[in-house]
């Protein structure tokens, strides 16, 4: 018995008026003007009053009959016409594409080259964790004083410098000289960039789509992290293999691969700085996003 058959079996035995499985989606969509529902072969206009009169059984029947709203897409394409939202997503994508490799390869360097244990590596990351918290704490105050765009660009610049300092890792390096300075600056830049990126992303977005804008930003973080780490790992591994094939010692080749990916990560962050400066502009609150039904400005 597939999912549809199970629901139909439940319907044939009767369901209570309140069914918590899917009505939330139906109700929220039906609040939007112009949404229509097809129930038992006929159309009814979706509205707050109409949704309120539908019990749990009717709502599931609406889904089974294909009665999802036909005029309100889950993600209106027009939302990407908001320049600041698109720009903030580009910046955050680049930041996370670099920053996951930033943490990952520092850990490999400390454990694989410097000989740290897992516990020692975790303790070595503690100052960087504090740096992230410090940056995130200062970001709202700085954004109020200098503007979110300037703070976002500054955070990306700090991350760029941090990544650039980590290019100096080598087999005879130390934590204090080769890891901590770049680690602190990169972590501080991460914390400094997160809050203003969210501010810029949702600024000027219709009130009805502010949650969607925040969700899109989070999606950019995760996709950037996954793709960035995959790309940086591939670059580092390929470079290490090439150096080993040319006769370089395994330890030297390994750290050279780490250094190369830190350099690429610095380029990602630098492009993010440029994107923050070029793409992000002050947006008038009264601007209207065309093509998005029910859009009200926040």
Image (cartoon, grey):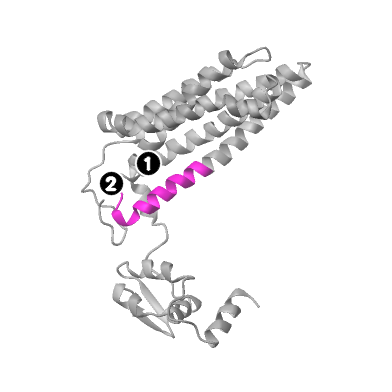
Depth check, front residue: 19 or 65: 19
Q: Position of residue 41 (x, y in %)?
A: 43, 85
Q: Disc 1 marks which residue?
A: 198
Tag 1's secondary structure? Answer: helix
Graded by Cα atoms within 10 Å as few (under 14), some (14 to 19) or many (20 or more), the crowding at tag 2 reads many
Q: Disc 2 marks which residue?
A: 204
Tag 2's secondary structure? Answer: loop
Q: Quadrant of residue 54?
A: bottom left
Main SS of the magenta part reads helix
Q: Position of residue 187 (x, y in %)?
A: 48, 27
Graded by Cα atoms within 10 Å as few (under 14), some (14 to 19) or many (20 or more), the crowding at tag 1 reads many
Residue range (magenta): 204-222
Depth check, front residue: 160 or 122: 122
Identity of the residue drawn at 47% across and 77% down:
60
Point out the tag, 1 or 2, that comes first from the N-terminus.
Answer: 1
Residue 93 higher or lower than 286, as above or below: above
Q: Position of residue 59 (x, y in %)?
A: 43, 77
Magenta residue check for 91 = no
Depth check, front residue: 276 or 131: 131
Q: Quadrant of residue 167?
A: top right
Relative side of 219 to 146, left or right: right
Identity of the residue drawn at 28% across and 61% down:
294
């Amino acid at each position: 018995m597939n999912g549809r058959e199970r629901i139909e079996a439940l319907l044939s035995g009767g369901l209570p008026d309140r069914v918590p499985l899917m009505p939330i989606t139906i109700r929220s969509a039906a609040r939007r003007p112009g949404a229509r529902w097809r129930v038992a072969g006929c159309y009814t206009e979706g509205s707050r009053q109409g949704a309120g009169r539908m019990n749990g059984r009717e709502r599931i029947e609406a889904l089974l009959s294909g009665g999802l709203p036909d005029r309100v897409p889950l993600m209106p394409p027009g939302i990407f016409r908001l320049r600041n939202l698109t720009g903030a997503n580009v910046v955050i994508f680049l930041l996370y594409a670099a920053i996951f490799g930033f943490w990952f390869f520092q850990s490999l360097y400390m454990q694989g080259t410097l000989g740290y244990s897992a516990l020692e590596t975790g303790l070595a990351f503690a100052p960087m964790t504090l740096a992230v918290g410090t940056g995130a704490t200062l970001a709202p105050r700085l954004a109020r004083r200098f503007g979110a765009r300037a703070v976002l660009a500054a955070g990306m610049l700090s991350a760029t410098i941090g990544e650039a300092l980590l290019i100096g890792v080598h087999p005879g390096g130390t934590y204090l000289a080769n890891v901590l300075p770049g680690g602190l600056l990169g972590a501080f830049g991460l914390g400094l960039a997160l809050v203003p990126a969210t501010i810029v992303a949702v600024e000027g977005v219709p009130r009805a789509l502010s949650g969607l804008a925040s969700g899109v930003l989070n999606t950019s973080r995760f996709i950037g992290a996954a793709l960035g780490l995959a790309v940086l790992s591939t670059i580092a591994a390929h470079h290490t293999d090439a150096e080993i094939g040319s006769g370089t010692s395994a330890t030297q080749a390994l750290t050279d691969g780490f250094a190369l990916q830190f350099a690429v990560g610095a380029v990602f962050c630098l492009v993010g700085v440029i994107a923050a400066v070029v793409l992000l502009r002050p947006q008038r609150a009264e601007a209207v996003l065309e093509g998005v039904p029910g859009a009200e400005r926040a």
